Image (cartoon, grey):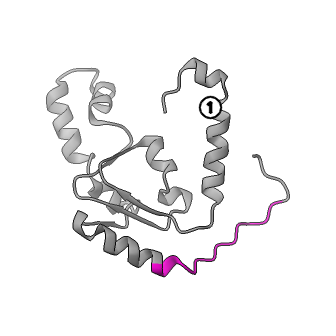
């Protein structure tokens, strides 16, 4: 999500917006398993609850936050005591518990249970019927 000027001139933002629009409008089952890090816009666009994702899981060691701990600490504390504040920030925010409490994650699951849960969800969602609102005009 940090395109260079060459990519910007090539239309990466326009094409990315089209992809995001199509993804948000898709009415197929959307299941997400966060295994490691899910930060900011990248988290939002990858089948989050904000884009009508059906089921969102996270492994216990996953990090779900607006941005990485080190970058957040440098902004919040102006680069002072970075090591100490990074540890505090990571313990407080960079874990799936905060996202689960806010309803962004449905469950924190054991990695060994991932296949079984995803298969069960696919069985439940195989008859998913989600009608998109008919629109006369769209912006894409």
In the displayed orientation, state which residue is furthest to the right.
136
The residue carrying mark 1 is 12
Percent position (x, y) of residue 122? Answer: 46, 75
Q: Is residue 28 magenta?
A: no
Viewer-side residue, 38 vs 111: 111
| Residue plotted at (37% across, 62% down) | 105
Residue 78, above or below 38: above
Quadrant of residue 107 within the rendered picture: bottom left
Q: Report the side of 73 relative to 51 (left or right).
A: left
Q: Report the side of 24 relative to 137 (left or right).
A: left
Quadrant of residue 104 within the rendered picture: bottom left
Categorize mark 1 by other alpha carbons within 10 Å: few (<14), some (14-19), many (20+). Answer: some
Residue 69, above or below 125: above
| Residue plotted at (52% across, 56% down) | 50
Percent position (x, y) of residue 30? Answer: 51, 64
Percent position (x, y) of residue 67? Answer: 36, 38
| Residue plotted at (51% across, 77% down) | 125
Q: Is mark 1 on a helix, strand or loop?
A: helix
Please, what is the dominant secondary structure of the magenta stretch? loop
Quadrant of residue 79 within the rendered picture: top left
In the displayed orientation, state which residue is furthest to the left.
84
Which range of residues does the magenta coloring cover?
A: 123-135
Viewer-side residue, 70 vs 118: 118
Residue 15, above or below 26: above
| Residue plotted at (27% across, 46% down) | 93
Q: Does the magenta stretch include residue 131?
A: yes
């Amino acid at each position: 999500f940090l395109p260079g000027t060459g990519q910007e001139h090539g239309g990466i933002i326009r094409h990315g917006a089209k992809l995001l629009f199509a993804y948000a409008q898709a009415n197929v089952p959307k299941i997400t398993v966060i295994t490691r890090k899910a930060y900011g816009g990248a988290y939002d666009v990858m089948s989050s609850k904000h884009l009508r994702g059906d089921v969102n899981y996270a492994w216990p060691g996953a990090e779900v936050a607006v941005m990485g701990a080190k970058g957040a600490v440098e902004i919040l504390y102006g680069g002072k005591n970075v090591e100490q504040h990074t540890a505090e920030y990571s313990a407080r925010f960079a874990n799936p518990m905060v996202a689960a409490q806010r309803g962004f994650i449905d469950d924190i699951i054991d990695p060994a249970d991932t296949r079984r849960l995803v298969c069960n969800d696919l069985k439940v969602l195989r008859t998913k019927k989600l009608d998109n609102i008919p629109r006369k005009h769209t912006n894409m």
